[in-house]
Image (cartoon, helix red, strand yellow):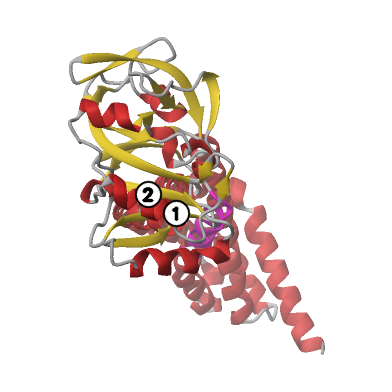
Amino acid sequence: MSGPINWLSQVVSVTKFGLLGIPQRRGSVAAAVFGIAGVVAVLVGVLSIAAGFRRAMTVSGTADSAIVLRTGADSEMMSGFGHASTRIIADAPGVARTPEGPLASSELFVIINLPKRSSNSDVNVPLRGVEQAAFPVHGQVKLVEGRAFEPGKNEVIVGVGAAREFSGMEVGGSLRVGRSDWPVVGVFSADGGVAESEIWTDAPVLQAAYNRGNSFQSVYVRLNSPEAFTTFKDAVTTDPRLSAKVMRLSEYYASQSTAVTTLITTLGVLIASLMAVGAVFGALNTMYSSVAARTREIATLRALGFGRGAVVVSVMLESIALAIGGGAFGAGLAYFVFNGFHSATMNWQSFSQITFAFAVTPQLLVLGVVLATVIGLIGGLLPAIRAARQPIASALREL
């Protein structure tokens, strides 16, 4: 029993000496720590973009909501239904109902150009025509300023994200649709969901403005319960009068975020990997400097009976401790700089701007610290082996 305890005390003693010597090597130590912090901050920061975009796309979908598209369509832009088809869908079993009628909203989705506040360059913004059931169907949508649009009038309400990112979208402003100016009468929130990037108006008014007759592109429904999804899906997809497919809203939005999140994640990992190589070399340099400065100290400990294994482990622990410190600093920096930062990017599935907030999640913070630990392990391994293999006699003669 004394053997393991003795070995552990050796590890603690050698590690303690190494950590106490950090002030004498503060230049190289600071370079390694800040290098690792930079790698972690960049990785967490870039991945927070993907996490925020994914959260904006998926938070809108609840377990009891579904979307109906035409068979073969991957997005609303590629879908289409006549008025008769949308009524059949709204009357399908499983759809929740109120005294006013079924909780189904047949919707029209078009793209308009608006200037961004930050650059005044025009970007694609989604303009959605909805029916009166849209508010209870979409669930999270709540007016935070102004009022709702009046049916039959050229009026719009704007998501808080769109109001923040695009010029003229505040209450009292207006946007140009066709040959008419449409006043902004309200601003709505959607718990950070994708609807906050959109502009809503009355569906029949939008149909007339774009000469769409009485056609729609999708039908959003609120179900009696999450379990009613299968009943509703089977009724819609097997009805010979329809050519439609049904998806849970959460699944649909998740599929719409795939291209952007994959691109951002790939770029983030690539950039962080390149930076990590530099951080590993920084850690190597720091630990080699530590070993060189402690050559006689380590040799003396070896002469007193300290084992090679204790020296290797202690040098590795010192490297890992420095790396974890740098990783924690970088993760904290990324959290305070990136978390909640609002931006907008192109959603390639709908070819329109999506506003969202960066999300530095606990999983990303843990990932950053794990990456720092790996860098510390790699950066400390070779110097640790070198320290353990130094001949005791020659090391004692070094000045």
Q: Position of residue 102 (x, y in %)?
A: 50, 47
- Figure label count: 2
Q: Position of residue 320 (x, y in %)?
A: 56, 62
The span shown in magenta is 361-374
| Image position of 386 (left or right of 114) | right
- Label 1 element class: loop
Q: Position of residue 276 (x, y in %)?
A: 38, 57
- Label 2 element class: helix
List the residue tagged with mark 2.
87
Dot 1 amino acid type: Asp
Determine whether 14 is above or below 64 in the image.
below
- Asked whether residue 160 is drawn in magenta, I would say no
Mark 1, residues whose alpha carbon is within 10 Å: few (<14), some, or many (≥20)? some
Is residue 277 something that shows in the picture?
A: yes
| Image position of 131 (left or right of 360) | left
**For this rendering, which residue is in front, 275 or 17?**
275
Name the outermost residue toward the top: 172
Q: Which mark identifies residue 91?
A: 1
- Asked whether residue 368 is drawn in magenta, I would say yes
Mark 2, residues whose alpha carbon is within 10 Å: few (<14), some, or many (≥20)? some
**For this rendering, which residue is in front, 235 or 70?**
235
Q: Position of residue 37 (x, y in %)?
A: 48, 47
Dot 2 amino acid type: Arg
The residue shown at (45%, 44%) is 56
| Mark 1 and mark 2 residues within 8 Å of each other at the beta carbon | yes
Q: Which mark identifies residue 393?
A: none
**For this rendering, which residue is in front, 244 or 263?**
244
Is residue 275 something that shows in the picture?
A: no
Quote the CA–CA distance across marks 1 and 2: 6 Å
